Image: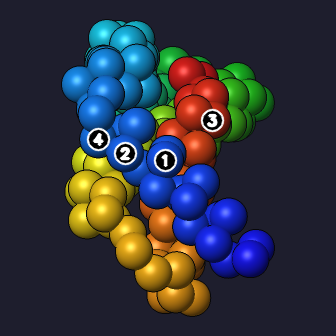
């Protein structure tokens, strides 16, 4: 009896999604698409900015090294400046790695939603509740709910 109740409920939900797929997609996906696009664009700009600063720090380090070699810069000052540049560069590299992972995750979420819709379409007319079908539906719903997690923007 429980199996029949669950099957009936799943069928209603799947028929609802199919019947209102356009509205469902708009509500679930398109509403946040513009915000995500802006967030991704901002993250990508931050990545570019950080990579430029990393390159600039390389050039600055070379310049202070040359100044140290020819005696324009004391050894203490060179050590202090190079330590500061090195610390900043390491932090930027860490930030770039994290932001690139965030961008990849955010782009993956978009693809996951398309997979979710595809899976839902497959099971709209479910007539038998099997363990395999249950796992696939639960997995599709988990993918869908995981995309609602907030993305960090740095």
* Separation of residues labelled 2 and 3 (CA atoms): 26 Å
Q: Residue furthest bottom?
A: 131
Provide the secondary structure element on which disc 3 rests.
loop
Q: Quadrant of the N terminus?
A: bottom right
Q: Quadrant of the C terminus?
A: top right
Provide the secondary structure element on which disc 2 rests.
helix
Q: Which residue is mark 4?
A: 18
* Label at residue 15: 2
Q: Nearer the viewer, mark 3 or mark 1?
A: 1
Q: Which residue is mark 3?
A: 149
Looking at the picture, how far across and down is residue 63, in whole percent? 39, 27
Provide the secondary structure element on which disc 4 rests.
helix
Please name whichever residue, 90 or 30, is drawn nearer the observer in this view of the structure: 30
* Label at residue 40: none
Query: How would you rate the neighbour count of disc 2 (Cα within 10 Å): few for under 14, some for 14-19, many for 20 or more?
Result: some
Q: How is the image coloured?
A: rainbow
* Separation of residues labelled 3 and 1 (CA atoms): 26 Å
Q: Nearer the viewer, mark 4 or mark 1?
A: 1
Quarter of the image for residue 57 reads top left
Query: How would you rate the neighbour count of disc 3 (Cα within 10 Å): few for under 14, some for 14-19, many for 20 or more?
Result: few
Asked whether disc 2 touches disc 3, contact meaning CB atoms under 8 Å apart, the reply is no
Mark positioned earlier in the residue sequence (4 or 1): 1
Query: How would you rate the neighbour count of disc 4 (Cα within 10 Å): few for under 14, some for 14-19, many for 20 or more?
Result: some
Q: Nearer the viewer, mark 3 or mark 4?
A: 4
Asked whether disc 4 touches disc 2, contact meaning CB atoms under 8 Å apart, the reply is yes
40 vs 103: above or below: above
Numbered-mark total: 4
Residue lying at 63% horizontally and 35% vertically, measured from the top left: 149
Looking at the picture, how far across and down is residue 126, in whole percent? 38, 69
Residue lying at 57% horizontally and 88% vertically, measured from the top left: 131
* Label at residue 12: 1
Q: Nearer the viewer, mark 2 or mark 3?
A: 2
């Amino acid at each position: 009896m429980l199996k029949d109740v669950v099957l009936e409920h799943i069928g209603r939900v799947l028929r609802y999604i199919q019947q209102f797929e356009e509205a469902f997609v708009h509500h679930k996906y398109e509403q946040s698409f513009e915000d995500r696009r802006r967030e991704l664009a901002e993250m990508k700009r931050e990545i570019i900015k950080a990579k430029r600063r990393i390159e600039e720090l390389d050039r600055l380090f070379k310049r202070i090294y040359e100044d140290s070699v020819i005696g324009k810069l004391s050894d203490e000052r060179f050590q202090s400046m190079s330590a500061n540049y090195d610390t900043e560069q390491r932090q930027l590299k860490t930030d770039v790695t994290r932001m690139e992972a965030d961008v990849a995750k955010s782009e993956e979420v978009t693809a996951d939603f398309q997979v979710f819709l595809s899976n839902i379409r497959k099971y709209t007319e479910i007539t038998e509740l099997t363990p395999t079908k249950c796992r696939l539906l639960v997995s599709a719903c988990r993918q869908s709910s995981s995309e609602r997690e907030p993305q960090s923007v740095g």
